[in-house]
Image (cartoon, coloured by chain):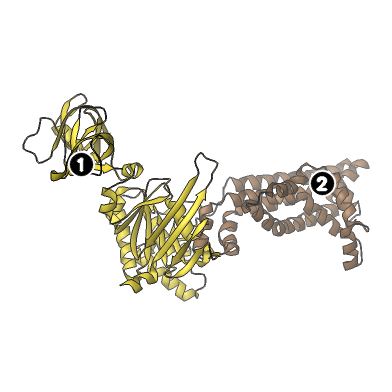
Chain colours: A brown, B yellow
């Protein structure tokens, strides 16, 4: 079950990074009136339509010892990024980016503009308005973003294989482990891991849908 | 008097164009002065009232103009000054109130007091909640309280920040008259001590009568009239304003002859044979004018009345009667169709019904000329 533990660790890291990175991006995409904004929206959505192998390939090229990112990394830390856990995190962040950013955009856009105006009129700048009004009112979207990027990372295969390879304990995630077991005809072990993934995925999606039905919205009127 | 009044006066000269996707471009082009006390901004919807308030609050940016409050420049297109909204210290209560749904009443009211120490914050919130009689609701969420209470809390939230100007965009819409009056009394009591300019937007005539010290009438992006409520609203110069001000009857007429000595002139309504006497206006015989008459200013009789001072008694026939709230709207055909408001009691006593012949009685000075 080492691979499952590794996948969990990877998914948690990726979800946490995506929340931090995704929020300013989503904020900008939700409120900017820049006319070329659609170009950035397209870039953000790109991982949704690209084959994971394409994304993985370019990431690998970028972080390889001759790629710009790889060179920088080697200069900073003395070792390469390809086929490491760090490289895996980077590739997964890119791959799951739209799964974090889209729900955030939707929920930011759903906040009544007059509430933002009210906050400004009452003396609050953009940052305070974000923390005190936008974020609390977007909580279902934040939860959705975190959970979806976690679940999506947990289930990724192609990108991991391209960027991380298959090193036990370092880059062998559960989905690759399942593939390995099937290749070596260990159907019992493959089934156990697949079942765990299936149950986790179902639980996660149920949670997201429940949150978005506002089953537990804390400020709803009685 | 001058110095002190000017010390807090809001002065705005604003030009803002809006080229929407819609049909006609809209231009707001106004120059207003708002002294301390309540000034009503009156006009039909689409006249530019909310755009004007948004410009003053800094939520919309004028293309050209200058906005000053008590001598401080908030916006000046020529000098490239545009103080951002959070720094303007202008309170603004929106039509939707925009209370934060996830915060308690107390947290909502304290929202604008971020820089104060905790104890002082609590004291000020308590004081203003008391002044607006909602201190019992402190821990409730906006979704749990009534409309009137929400309106009081929105006012309290704005005023607790000690703003230098208060903008109110139809904040009391949907409240009954009594509740409205009680909230306005609380607002007046609060402002008696503070003396800030309050710009109060409305499109209903009742509110003007109940509140107004001064009225600025806006139509299609321009100030068409400003002054005391009676002057502004009883002499409507524009058709839309006339309708908004409650002149339900707006009739085309031709001037027949002028009687300068009596201060009146006779006009014929539309293409009908119906002639009435109206106050003398700047019009020559034969010219076309419009006459505005409030539905509530017309008397209705079932027999030809005699011995009246009213100069206009017109014969007609009831087309329809329609109950609307606590009053009945009668449509009466006299060659032109008049709309007359009567009480349900009068309908019963006079046994009115559609088709019944009636006489309408109009005082000369209930007939207003519209340019």
The residue shown at (35%, 63%) is B132
User: Is B151 left or right of A39, judged from the image as shown?
Assistant: left
Question: Is B23 in front, or is B143?
Answer: B23
Q: Position of residue B22 (x, y in %)?
A: 52, 40
Residue at the (26%, 39%) spot, across then down: B291
Q: Which residue is mark 1?
A: B297
* Camera sees residue B327: yes
In the shown orientation, is residue B16 left or right of residue B260? right
Chain hosting mark 2: A
Q: Residues within 10 Å of mark 2 (few under 14, many from 20)?
A: some
The quarter holding residue B35 reads bottom left
Residue B108 placement (x, y as % from top left): 47, 62
Location of the C terminus of chain B (image quadrant): top left
Q: Nearer the viewer, mark 2 or mark 1?
A: 1
Residue B255, horizontal then vertical, whole percent = 23, 36
Task: Tell me the SS state at disc 2.
Answer: helix
Q: Closer to the camera, B4 or A98?
A: B4
List the single residue furthest toward the left.
B307
The image shows residue A131 at horizontal and vertical percentages of 59, 62
Q: Does residue A171 appear anywhere in the picture?
A: no
**SS state under label 1:** helix
Q: Verify CB contact (< 8 Å) between mark 2 and mark 1.
A: no
- What residue is pinned by disc 2? A193
Residue drawn at point x = 86 percent, y = 49 percent: A56
Give the residue at x 37% y 64%: B197
């Amino acid at each position: 079950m080492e691979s499952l533990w590794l996948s969990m660790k990877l998914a948690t890291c990726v979800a946490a990074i995506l929340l931090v990175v995704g929020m300013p991006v989503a904020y900008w995409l939700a409120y900017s009136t820049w006319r070329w904004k659609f170009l950035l929206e397209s870039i953000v959505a790109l991982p949704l339509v690209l084959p994971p192998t394409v994304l993985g390939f370019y990431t690998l090229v970028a972080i390889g010892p001759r790629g710009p990112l790889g060179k920088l990394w080697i200069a900073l830390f003395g070792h390469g990024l390809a086929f490491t856990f760090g490289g895996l995190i980077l590739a997964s962040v890119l791959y799951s980016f739209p799964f974090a950013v889209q729900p955030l955009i939707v929920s930011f856009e759903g906040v009544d503009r007059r509430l933002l105006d009210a906050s400004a009129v009452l003396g609050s700048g953009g940052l305070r308005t974000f923390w005190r009004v936008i974020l609390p009112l977007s909580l279902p979207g934040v939860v959705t973003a975190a959970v979806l990027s976690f679940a999506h990372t947990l289930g990724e295969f192609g990108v991991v294989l391209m960027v991380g390879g298959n090193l036990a304990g370092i880059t062998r995630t559960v989905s690759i482990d399942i593939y390995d077991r099937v290749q070596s005809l260990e159907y019992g072990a493959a089934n156990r891991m697949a079942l765990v993934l299936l149950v986790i995925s179902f639980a996660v999606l149920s949670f997201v849908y429940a949150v978005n039905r506002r089953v537990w919205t804390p400020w709803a009127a009685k | 008097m001058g110095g002190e009044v000017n010390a807090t006066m809001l002065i705005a000269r604003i030009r803002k164009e809006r080229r929407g996707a819609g049909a006609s471009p809209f231009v707001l082009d106004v120059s207003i002065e708002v002294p301390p006390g309540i000034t009503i901004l009156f006009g039909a919807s689409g006249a530019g009232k909310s755009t004007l308030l948004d410009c003053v609050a800094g939520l919309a940016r004028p293309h050209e103009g200058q906005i000053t409050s008590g001598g401080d420049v908030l916006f000046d297109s020529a000098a490239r000054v545009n103080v951002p909204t959070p720094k303007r210290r202008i309170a603004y209560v929106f039509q939707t109130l925009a209370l934060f749904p996830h915060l308690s009443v107390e947290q909502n009211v304290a929202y604008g007091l971020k820089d104060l120490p905790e104890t002082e914050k609590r004291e000020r919130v308590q004081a203003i909640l008391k002044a607006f009689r909602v201190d019992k609701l402190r821990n409730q969420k906006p979704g749990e309280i009534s409309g009137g209470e929400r309106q009081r809390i929105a006012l309290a939230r704005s005023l607790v920040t000690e703003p230098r100007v208060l903008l109110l965009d139809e904040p009391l819409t949907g409240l009954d008259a009594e509740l409205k009056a009680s909230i306005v009394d609380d607002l007046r009591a609060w402002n008696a001590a503070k003396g800030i300019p309050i710009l109060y937007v409305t499109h209903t005539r009742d509110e003007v009568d109940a509140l107004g010290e001064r009225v600025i009438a806006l139509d299609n992006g321009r100030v068409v009239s400003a002054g005391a409520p009676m002057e502004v609203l009883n002499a409507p110069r524009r058709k839309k304003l006339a309708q908004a001000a409650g002149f339900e009857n707006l009739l085309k007429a031709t001037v027949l002859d002028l009687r300068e000595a009596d201060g009146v002139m006779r006009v014929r309504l539309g293409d009908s044979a119906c002639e009435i006497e109206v106050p003398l206006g700047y019009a020559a015989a034969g010219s076309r004018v419009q006459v505005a008459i409030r539905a509530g200013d017309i008397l209705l009789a079932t027999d030809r009345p005699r011995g009246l001072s009213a100069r206009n008694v017109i014969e007609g026939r009831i087309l329809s009667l329609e109950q609307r709230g606590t009053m009945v709207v009668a449509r009466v055909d006299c060659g032109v169709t008049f709309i007359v408001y009567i009480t349900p009691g009068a309908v019963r006593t006079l046994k009115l019904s559609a088709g019944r012949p009636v006489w309408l009685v109009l005082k000369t000075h209930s007939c207003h000329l519209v340019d």
